[in-house]
Image (spheres, helix red, strand yellow):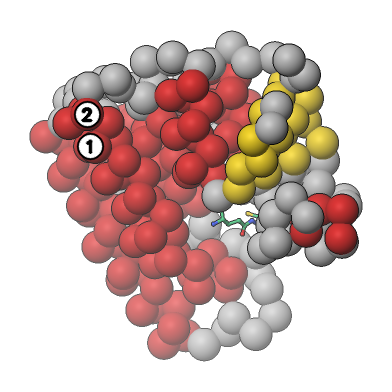
Amino acid sequence: MDRLRILGRTTSSNVRKVLWTADLCGIDYVQEVWGQPHRDPRVPEFLALNPNGTVPVIVDGALVLWESNAIVRYLAESRGSGLWPAAVQEHAMVDQWLTWQASELLPSWQYAVSALLARNPGFDDPAKIAASIALWTAKMRMLEDRLMSGGGFAANRRLSVADLALAISTHRWFSTPFAREELPAVRDHYETLKATPEGAKYLSAETP
Ligand SMILES: N[C@@H](CCC(=O)N[C@@H](CS)C(=O)NCC(=O)O)C(=O)O
């Protein structure tokens, strides 16, 4: 079988989740650097793989897959790594936190990160920045509670793909310049993962 293809630039947080998972699963993959400003994904060749025109995308034999959290689930499950537990109730918990990362946590920080970190034009409304920070902080407090009651992990008291996705989001929390609340369990979770070789690579200052 051909090597797994991972299409996406490492500067994308959604791509980093996938690369980190693939590394921990010991997968022999080839990365193709798609995404602005490197290679515009909104071209027919790429849109044929992902009609959203976004990265990441993987190609694994006949399977073409997009949506970063679907990809990390697939890689962890298909490679039999412990990052996706076999027991249904255990993987349901991992799935809950993965889904929460994408559907609740990520939207909460988008305005604040666009304004304060990316400094994108048009994101300069103080009221919207404050609202985004308030919502983001509320979500991060939920993560703090979960990590405190969960032995320092998102689910099942052990490492899973949910921890990787959450740490990538936490990286935004620490990279964005604002007076953030101190959340000790969140900091421990982040620093513990960042102290691993893969964590050091994917939670680095060059990739906020
Ligand atoms: N929900 C999608 C979001 C994908 C997405 O928005 N990717 C961004 C990078 S993080 C992208 O492709 N931006 C356009 C570009 O890089 O050219 C996922 O989780 O995979």
| Numbered disc 1: secondary structure | helix
Q: Residue at x 44, y 59 (%)?
A: 106
Q: In this view, does 159 lie above or below 203?
A: above
Query: Which residue lies most toward the front here?
Result: 62
Q: How many marks?
A: 2
Quadrant that contains the N terminus: top right
Nearer to the camera, 182 or 96: 96
Image quadrant where residue 64 sits: top right
Residue under label 2, please give it: 88
Q: Residue at x 43, y 66 (%)?
A: 107
Q: Residue at x 65, y 85 (%)?
A: 122
- Counting from the top left corner in percent of width and height, residue 163 is at 37, 33
Residue 165 falls left or right of residue 207: left
Image quadrant where residue 5 sits: top right
Instruction: Report how far apart the C-alphas of labels 2 and 1 lie in the structure.
Output: 9 Å
| Numbered disc 2: secondary structure | helix
| Neighbour tally class for label 2: few under 14, some 14-19, many 20 plus, Cα within 10 Å | few
Whether residue 10 appears in this view of the structure is: no
Nearer to the camera, 13 or 135: 13
Question: In the image, which is nearer the foreground, mark 2 or mark 1?
Answer: 2
Residue under label 1, please give it: 93
Residue 119 falls left or right of residue 193: right
The quarter of the rendering in which ligand 1 is drawn is bottom right
| Neighbour tally class for label 1: few under 14, some 14-19, many 20 plus, Cα within 10 Å | some
Which tag, 2 or 1, sits closer to the chain's start? 2
- What type is the residue that disc 2 sits on? Val
- What type is the residue that disc 1 sits on? Met
- Counting from the top left corner in percent of width and height, residue 63 is at 64, 35
Q: Which residue is drawn at 60% across and 19% down?
A: 23
- Counting from the top left corner in percent of width and height, residue 61 is at 70, 27
